[in-house]
């Protein structure tokens, strides 16, 4: 697959509320950010996989955005072994801290296109 | 090797960036007793937006050379972000040593405040982050990163601080103590923008910008330029050499690093340093955020990873202390010219080495370690400067 085809597949997964990631069938390396080659071995033998969408917070920070809303951005380590930088959505700020479990949740941020976000699991 | 230098730092510089460059270059040339025709090499750095509010300039080395009348036979463009100034000094030194040029002029800085003004007053803020991707990209995955709200790059260093606290129990008070010790140094530096008494409590009570980082742990962006000339020949300055050098580049997006985010590339650049750190008279450590200094000091090997909080409590990092760090107050107190603190720490090393640090001079500053850190812990340049005997 070309890079554009992979990106397109990612967008389709997102809109179906599925979280994709890539596994190199040559060396086994697992990564999330879309590439048409494996960054470890340059193999093009890649499989797009579906993640369970569950993981834990590796780190996070809370700030107030321009609209005055408390916003959380963080690094999420997914069970499959890759990491995503994304916003964490919650009404319970006290539940958000390093090592806490989170799961994926999709939200339309650009017209017609959903993206993955994360939310706490109680 | 250092023949002349000059800088100008202002909260908001009123002229154009070329005025700022022309003034500092003239002063640096005067100190070196040189004219533009004597310069045969030029090195600069260029950050989109931050130089003069344009998003791009083709051939920045030529743009500057053309304006100030330089005809270089050697040029270089160093894109190490905040660490660029430190790396530029090393590249210039190497170019002169190898005979590629005899006298290299290095220019770094800009009018970073223009970007803030544009964001505040219109034009660019109407573009969404995603629309901006068509004119400015930072990495191949921007579409999958910039849809999220953050305070880039503060968010990244805030996450480093949060994780450092979680893993090692580092406290807000310990980071604040570093800011307090740097302020002590700034209080003896007439050029410091921020002066006056500062306590740990003051830092803790300042607004939390992005948890856990407080306002007084974050450098304040200003306008400014540093110009310096590295070359053959003698000048009124003390003969300066690079005693040891190391650099490291971690280009990966920080979500894809194999190494924990509490490490900086200094852990790699410092391994290349062949010099006993006990003999360093002053440490000039990149300080856009308190947490950067903490993690750099660990990665340099002054203490083990995770032990920096206690280290700061048990040592005196001021100019009167046993391990002087950021002897002029650092960019936390000088301001951050054009979003690049490397400018401040490199010039402070020049001042200390030449006994020119009025009021904040460390006695016998013969060996100075400068550690630049750029991007999102992306580039590190570690230099030990001194006189070769
Ligand atoms: Zn592979």
Image (tube, coloured by chain):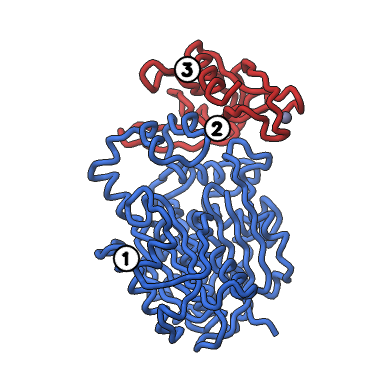
Q: In the rendered image, which quarter is residue A42 located in?
A: top right
State the residue lying farthest toward the left: B121
Q: Residue furthest top?
A: A16
Camera-near label (1 vs 2) is 1
The image shows residue B291, relative to residue A52, as above or below, that is below
C-alpha gap between disc 3 and disc 1: 48 Å
Question: Who's the residue at 36% across and 78% down the image?
Answer: B26
Mark 2 residue's CB less than 8 Å from ligand 1: no
User: How many C-alpha atoms fall within 10 Å of the one at disc 3: few (<14), some, or many (≥20)?
Assistant: some
Check disc 3 and report its element: helix, strand or loop: strand
Q: CA distance from mark 3 to mark 2?
A: 21 Å
Q: Chain of mark 2?
A: A
Q: Colour of chain B?
A: blue
Residue A29 image point, x, y percent? 71, 28
A22 left or right, relative to B328: right
Q: Nearer the viewer, residue B261 or B2?
A: B2
The chain drawn in red is A
Q: What's the chain of the residue with tag 1?
A: B
Residue on which disc 1 sits: B18
């Amino acid at each position: 697959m070309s890079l554009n085809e992979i990106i397109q597949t990612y967008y389709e997964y997102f809109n179906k509320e599925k979280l994709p990631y890539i596994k190199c069938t040559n060396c086994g390396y697992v990564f999330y950010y879309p590439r048409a080659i494996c960054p470890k071995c340059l193999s093009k033998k890649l499989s797009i996989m579906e993640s369970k969408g569950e993981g834990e917070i590796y780190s996070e920070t809370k700030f107030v955005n321009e609209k005055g809303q408390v916003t959380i951005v963080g690094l999420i380590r997914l069970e499959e072994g890759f990491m995503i930088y994304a916003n964490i959505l919650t009404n319970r700020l006290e539940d958000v801290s390093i090592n806490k479990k989170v799961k994926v949740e999709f939200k339309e941020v650009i017209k017609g296109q959903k993206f993955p976000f994360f939310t706490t699991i109680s | 090797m250092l023949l002349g230098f000059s800088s100008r730092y202002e909260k908001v510089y009123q002229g154009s960036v070329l005025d700022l460059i022309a003034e500092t270059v003239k002063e640096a040339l005067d100190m070196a007793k040189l004219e533009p025709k004597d310069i045969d090499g030029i090195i600069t750095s260029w950050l989109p937006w931050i130089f003069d509010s344009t998003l791009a300039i083709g051939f920045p080395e030529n743009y500057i050379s053309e304006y100030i009348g330089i005809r270089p036979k050697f040029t270089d463009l160093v894109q190490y972000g905040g660490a660029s100034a430190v790396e530029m000094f090393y590249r210039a030194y190497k170019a002169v040593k190898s005979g590629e040029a005899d006298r290299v002029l290095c220019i770094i800085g800009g009018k970073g405040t223009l970007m803030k003004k544009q964001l505040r007053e219109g034009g660019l803020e109407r573009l969404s982050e995603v629309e901006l991707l068509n004119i400015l990209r930072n990495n191949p995955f921007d579409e999958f990163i910039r849809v999220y709200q953050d305070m880039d790059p503060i968010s990244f260093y805030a996450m480093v601080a949060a994780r450092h606290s979680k893993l090692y129990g580092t406290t807000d008070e310990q980071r604040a103590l570093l800011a307090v010790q740097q302020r002590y140094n700034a209080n003896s530096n007439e050029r410091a923008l921020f002066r006056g008494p500062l306590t740990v409590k003051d830092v803790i009570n300042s607004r939390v910008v992005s948890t856990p980082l407080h306002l007084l742990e974050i450098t304040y962006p200003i306008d400014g330029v540093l110009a310096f000339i590295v070359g053959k020949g003698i000048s009124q300055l003390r003969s300066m050499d690079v005693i040891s050098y190391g650099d490291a580049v971690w280009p990966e997006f920080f979500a894809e690093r194999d190494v924990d985010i509490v490490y900086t590339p200094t852990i790699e650049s410092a391994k290349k340093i062949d010099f006993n750190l006990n003999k360093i008279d002053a440490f000039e450590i990149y300080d856009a955020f308190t947490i950067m200094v903490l993690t750099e000091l660990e990665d340099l090997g002054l203490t083990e990873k995770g032990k920096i909080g206690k280290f700061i409590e048990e040592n005196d990092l001021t100019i009167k202390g046993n391990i002087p760090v950021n002897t002029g107050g650092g960019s936390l107190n000088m301001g951050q010219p054009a979003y690049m603190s490397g400018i401040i720490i490199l010039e402070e090393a020049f001042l200390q080495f030449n006994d020119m640090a009025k009021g904040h001079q460390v006695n016998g500053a013969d060996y100075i370690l400068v550690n630049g850190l750029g991007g999102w812990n992306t580039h590190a340049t570690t230099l030990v400067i001194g006189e070769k005997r």
